[in-house]
Structure formats: C-alpha cells, structure tokens
Amino acid sequence: MLPIINELGQLPGLNLQDLTVFFILILIASLRVGAFLIAAPFFGSRMVPLQIRIVFSFCLGFWILDVASFPDRSILMSAKLIPIIFQEIIIGVSAGMVVTIAFASVSLAGEKIAATSGLAFASQVDPVGGGQSPVISSILTLFMIVIFFSINGHLVVFGLLYDSFDIIPIGQFEEYSRLPKMGLASAELMLKTSAMLMLPIVSIMLLINVSVGFITKSAPQLNLFSFGFPMTILGAIFILYFSVDALAFGFQDLAKAILKLLGNLLMGETDGG
C-alpha cells in the first residue's frame, strides 16, 4: 500500500514527479463519495448545484486520504487503474440508488393520495427529480428530507461511507452479488412502505367518495363537480392535517430502514441496522 500521510498527520513535501500520483489519489478517494452524491436523493437533486457537489466530493476526498489504503504506485500508473475507477463509481452509485429508490416510496404514496383525492391536477416541479409531480407528493418528499436530516441520517451515511474504506478497500471489491440484492431489497421497501403510508388515507377517501356518491344520487342537483370535488379535497386536507404525527413516525422508521439497507450494502452486515 502507498503511504500518503506521515506520522504527524500532515502531507509530506511533494516532489514534482509525485504530484501526478497525488492528484490520482485525490481522484480515486473522491470517486466513491462523489458518485454517491450524484445518485443520492437530496445531494443529487437540482437544488444542489453541480459545482457544489464536485467541490464537496473533493473535500471529502482529502478527508478520506487519511483512512483509505491505496494500491501500489505501479498499479496507479498502469492500465489496472481503470477497473479500480469503475469499481469505485459502481459502489458509490449503487449506494446512492439504494437510498433514492427507498426515498421514492414517499413520492409514490403522495401520488396515489393525490389521485384519490382529486389533487392530482395541482402539480409543480419536483425539486428532487426535476419533473412534474403532485403538490402532495412534493410536500411529503420535503417532509421526509427534513425528518432524515433531523435524525442525523446524513451524518450516519457519511460515517458508513467513511468506514466502508476499511471493509471494502480500494481495488479489492469482489462481492458484486450484494449490489443487485440490496437494489431489490430497496425496491421491496419502497412498495411496502408506500402501501403502508397511503392505505389508511386512501381508505378514508374511499368512504368519502362513497358518501358523496350516495348524496349526489339522492340529490341530483348536487352534481359531482360542484359538490364532490370540494368535499374530497377538503377531506384530504383534513386527513393529512391530522395524520402529520403518524406520517412523521412512519418517515422516521423509513429513514432507519434506509440506513440499515445502506449498512448492509457498504459494511456487509446482515442482522444489524
């Protein structure tokens, strides 16, 4: 392994011929974190400019230089560096996609709630994905991001990335079967969590729609557009208002499940969170 930091924890004096190797080490150290920042739900969104993500990844790369074990100089200056670069990108993108897929459960639940309550027409630009999404979906997504940051989930994520260099050293990753397994587990978590979040609200909205149907059938002058839509929209607003506490606890459990999946991917854990 190539030592980079001396015993005093400082960078040694670099000769001109070592400058190229130092830049290569900075690049390799920032690839895993940079790929994660590109694929992560909040850091990879359009709310965070690309320049900030690049600078942040290189800053974390300097931080990782002290803990990561790098291959020998002969490997860094040869064609064997190319598979190492691809491995680091695959690990970072896989970790970011696992978190993104699990985060999508909140957006999916919001879309189904909006479609049931008649609020699907109220759409805006999604700050995370950049496309059009219902207002309820955007609100729940931002609520999930706030919950995730409030429990210091971002610090846990960076801690897992920091410790992953001890479990998965640079250039020594061989267990590729864990990547699709965790991807399928995150998709399972997305579908299961979105169903658990939306079913209580959608069930109440179904009862409201059935009641509106009985009323409009008994009083034809109260048609669907003048009576049904306002009732369903108001009912959805009241249901969401009284469901804030339950949604907060559900989002907290989802955040813990996301961190557990990420730990299984990066640390190789199977029973802990």
Image (cartoon, rainbow, N blue to C red):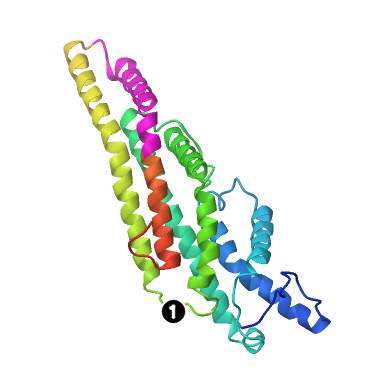
For residue 127, which quarter of the picture?
top right
Q: Considering the image in quadrants, where does the N terminus appear?
A: bottom right
Q: Mark 1 points at which residue?
A: 174
Q: Where is residue 145 in the image (x, y as percent from the top left)?
A: 49, 42
The residue at 75%/69% (across/down) is 10
Q: Residues within 10 Å of mark 1 (few under 14, many from 20)?
A: few
- First to last magenta residue range: 221-249
Q: Does the magenta stretch include residue 151?
A: no
For residue 110, which quarter of the picture?
top left
Figure label count? 1
Q: In this view, does 143 lie above or below 181?
A: above
Compared across the picture, whether 47 is left or right of 109 comes to: right
Q: Where is residue 36 in the image (x, y as percent from the top left)?
A: 54, 60
Compared across the picture, whether 38 is left or right of 54 comes to: left
Compared across the picture, whether 8 is left or right of 213 comes to: right
Identify which residue, 117 or 220, lies in the foreground: 117
Q: Considering the image in quadrants, where does the C terminus appear?
A: bottom left
Q: In this view, does 82 lie above or below 158?
A: below
Q: Main secondary structure of the magenta part?
A: helix
Q: Position of residue 169 (x, y in %)?
A: 53, 75
The residue at 50%/64% (across/down) is 93
Q: Is mark 1 on a helix, strand or loop?
A: loop
Q: Is residue 235 above or below residue 182?
A: above
Q: Is residue 237 magenta?
A: yes
Q: Can residue 104 be seen in this view?
A: no
Q: Position of residue 97 (x, y in %)?
A: 46, 59
Amino acid beneath label 1:
Glu
The residue at 59%/48% (across/down) is 46
